[in-house]
Amino acid sequence: MTARKTTRKTTKTARKAARKTVDSAGRTPEQLLEAYRQMVRIRAFEDNANELYLQAKMPGLTHMSSGQEASAVGVCEALDERDKITSTHRGHGHCVARGATFRPMFCELLGKEEGYCHGKGGSMHIADQENGNLGANAIVGGSTGIATGAAFSAKYLGTGGVAVCFLGDGALGQGILYEVMNMAALWKLPVIYACENNQYGEYTHIDEMLAGNMLERARAFGIEAEEVDGQDLLAVMAAADRAVARARAGEGATFLALKTYRYFGHHVGDINRSYYRTKEEEEHWKAERDPIPLFGEVLLERGIATAEELTAIGEAISREAEEAVEYALEAPYPPAEAARDHVYAS
Amino acid sequence: MPEITYRQAINDALAEEIERDENVFVMGEEVAQYNGAYKVTEGLYDRFGEDRIKDTPISEAGFIGMGIGASMLGLRPVMELMFWSFSYVAFDQIVNNAAMVRYMSGGLTHVPIVIRGPANGGTNVGATHSHTPENFMAHTPGLKVVCPATPYDAKGLLKTAIRDNDPVYVMENTLLYGNKGEVPTEEYTIPLGHAQVLREGRDVSLIGHGRSILTALEAAGHLAGEGIEAEVVDLRSLRPLDIDTVLASVARTHRVVLVDENKPFCGVSAQVSHMIQEEAFDELDAPIRRVTSLDAPAIYSDPLEREQLPNPRRIQEAVQQVLEDAPRAAG
């Protein structure tokens, strides 16, 4: 099996899990291949961002989403140009999944003028309006109001658009989430709360922070709630398709609990994680549940791509990311006088 | 010119802007079917319907957060806070989202939201319901803050606020809602950042905003009876702040009493005082005096609260003090 070599640590269990997903979520082979590329792009972006930070070339604080690629891509692949997303402090993946490109993203992370936000947002506040990304929000739960307001505006203006609020399981502790879910349910707003349950809020396991069942919290408002394997791209896509269809049909909000795992720590500096989770647990998720090789297996088994093609995709994207990093490192900072720009519109 | 109440002036501004621009809508607690806790939105629900006048649950953080999101996509929400005191549960939205989104997006996203409601003490409702957070808000780059004192200003400033592409926070006053004043029937707006001299005088400048400036005007009337001519300057807009009109008044009178319903520590008048001494130190003949709310949480008991807030007697005493500090030339 050449596939084994090219899809990293794929194991028997992983292949079995991949085979279980028989549905293509209504996508063409090219769409499926593009979804695969998007996941690989996210991984490549994060690997390079992590490296920049470790080499002290990147300022501030950043949070890696490696391991969570399928939830970002699966949800965003269900959206079109009418739709909006809001993102979190762990938001690079959402930004890439919505169509952002490497150069302005790395420029933003490095505080450069050519960044998506002219270097004023950084990793935790990156936005890309042209692709419908209203922005990462570094306050946990901070974008839940914005996303629900985006859904309100879609309904008010009759655009047919849907708003996706990406949130982590940590945001389940914030009160505003329940305020806006209440209004979203009362007013049947076209919003999807895509909860990426990576099982850790900062440095604490969800079991120590979450009482009861998260699905029941949404259902208490009459919001449709669904638990999804967040490592299975096709499952995420199919669930997102159902949520989008419901929203566009005027049937209101959906809560998706996407169970996933973050490979890195809470932030890039969180290197010694043994006091809150085991190496064995991390290895299990990387070896058995990595969404990229899992989906690679599906593509191979369906004859959508060969192992060589998948390898080539990975190599091309790696080169693209490295080139973008080089570009961003050389790119100019904003001029000093830019500090006072953009405070007010007028 | 017809005389209408401050409440009606705001109601008219809302109605006119809702008619003018289909993206303008009103949202808040009890604004629709109940016609507003203070009846500011009276009749708007019947006239414009539930799409434009929207009742919300008691969820300030949630509905203001939603208003911000809606405004980022081109709508112009006018959010009513039953009291600005209730803004504190929505502080993250009001500061981190409304004020910061534009800057952090590199200027690519506008947040044309208006948040309005009363921000005042003096009604014996105790400390949690009597906050005047205009200083908190004006502290934050990205926010604009106006405090109209008259029906004319309330209408003109609110209409400008709704058309502005930045978040504008309008601080009203429950004690002013019933006040009447002249308001033209024809269309007008008032640009933000323009102070107004309400009364001219050569001996001392009384400078402030909101209901306090009306208190100052009353004190100026009493002072005139004692032969003291006080100039009264209404800031109207705190951010942007029209410091030029303030400095011109200081250059005429050389004595300053700042009148401010804020608490003294880091209050609006502390900022204005700093700006005056920095720009017009040589014009001052006496130290700047302030009449603010007494530095304690808002007091429930009626006679004590009357004393806690700026009142004509305390203003007159402060004026006497600056005149002792720098006596007028004889004759």
Image (spheres, grey):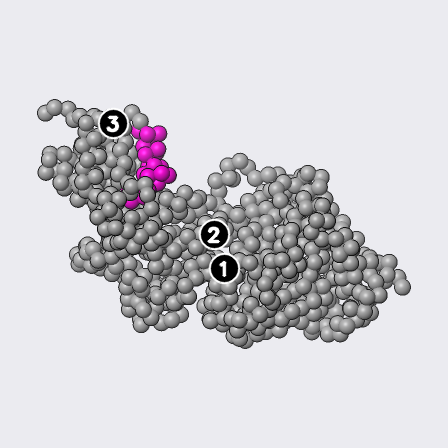
Q: In the rendered structure, which disc, 3 or 2, sits on the residue that comes first in sequence?
A: 2
Q: Can residue B278 be found in the magenta stretch?
A: yes
Instruction: Name the foreground residue: B141 vs B16.
Output: B141
| Residue count near mark 2 (Cα–Cα under 10 Å), binned few <14, some 14–19, many ≥20 | some
Instruction: Name the foreground residue: A330 vs A195.
Output: A195
Q: Which residue is mark 2?
A: B92
Q: How many marks?
A: 3
A332 on left or right of B234: right
| Residue count near mark 3 (Cα–Cα under 10 Å), binned few <14, some 14–19, many ≥20 | some
Chain letter for mark 3: B
Q: Which residue is mark 1?
A: A176
Residue A142 position, x and y percent, is 52, 55
One can see residue B186 in this view:
no
Residue B265 position, x and y percent, is 36, 38
Give the SS element for disc 1.
helix
Q: Are marks 3 and 1 on the same chain?
A: no
Q: Does residue B299 sit above or below A173 in this rendering? A: above
Chain letter for mark 1: A
Residue B149 position, x and y percent, is 25, 49
**Label 2, label 1: how far apart the Cα atoms are:** 10 Å
Chain letter for mark 2: B
What's the mark number on residue B286?
3
- Residue at screen point 33% across, 50% down: B127
